[in-house]
Amino acid sequence: MAIEIGTHKRPPEDMPEAHGEIPVWNAENWFYEDFTVGDKIRSLRRTISEGEAMQFNMMVMDLHPYVADEHFAKNEGVFGRRLVAGAQVFSYGLGLAATNCLNSFSYGYDRLRFIKPVFIGDTIYTIRENLSKEPKYDDMGLVRVSYSVFKEDGVLALYCEHLMTVKYQDPSAQQSSANRQAGSSEK
C-alpha cells in the first residue's frame, strides 16, 4: 500500500474546523507500519548561490580557504573554484527530501560520505530511499533511510544513511512479532 507523501490526517484542535480539514503539506502522520522498504522519493532541484554559501560559512564559522577565499580557490586550490561547505551540502540535501513525520525521531546518521565536490552555482537534488526497518523498543521501531544527493548532471555528490525511531501504530502487534523472531532464533 502506497502512502500519501506530504500530507497527514491529524486535525489540529486549535483552529477553525474548516481549516483543520485541509491536509497540511509535509507533516505526515506515518507510523512504523507505514514505511515500506524500497520506497523512494525525489526532491525538487535547488541551486546554491554565492550569497547563501557565504552566509552559511559565517553562521558556522567555516572560513576555510576552499569555501571562503575566491583568490585562493582559483589560484592555489585543487579544484580551481570555491566549494560549498560539506556541512551545507549535507543540510540542504537532507532538507530537500526530509519529511516532517509526526511520529519519527532522529536516532543518528551513518555512512556519511562527500563523494564529489559541490561548487557555488551548482544545482542539487536528493533521492531518499527506505532501506530497512526493525523493531527496537516497546513503542518504536528503527527505520533506516538513505539520502543520495546528486548534482544537476546526475553525479552523486553525497551519501548518508539516517536512522530514525518511529512510533508503532500497534505496539502489541510489533512486540508479538519481535517475540516470535526471538523465539525462532533461539532454536
Image: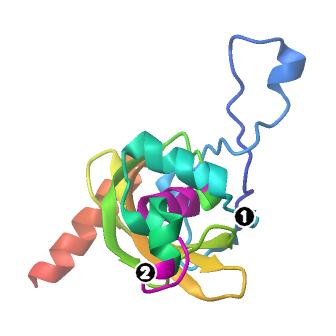
Magenta residue check for 186: no
Crowd class of label 1 (few under 14; some 14 to 19; many from 20; radius 10 Å): few
Q: In which quarter of the image is residue 59?
A: top left
24, above or below 45, in the image? above
Question: Front-most of 45 and 165?
Answer: 45
Tell me what residue is drawn at x 39 percent, y 45 percent: 60
Which segment did they paint magenta?
Answer: 75-95
Checking the image for residue 47, the label placed there is: 1
Q: Residue 39, can we see it? A: yes
Q: Quadrant of residue 17?
A: top right
First reached walking from the N terminus: tag 2 or tag 1: 1
Outermost residue toward the right?
A: 18
Magenta residue check for 78: yes
Crowd class of label 2 (few under 14; some 14 to 19; many from 20; radius 10 Å): some
- How far across and how far down the image is residue 157, in percent? 53, 80
Amino acid on which disc 1 is placed: Thr
**In which quadrant will I find the N terminus?**
bottom right
As helix, strand or loop, the secondary structure at mark 2 comes to loop
Question: Front-most of 47 and 121?
Answer: 121
Residue topped by disc 2: 77
Instruction: Give the alpha-carbon distance from disc 2 to disc 1, as whole Å.
Output: 22 Å
Amino acid on which disc 2 is placed: Gly
- How far across and how far down the image is residue 170, in percent? 45, 47
Tell me what residue is drawn at x 75 percent, y 67 percent: 45
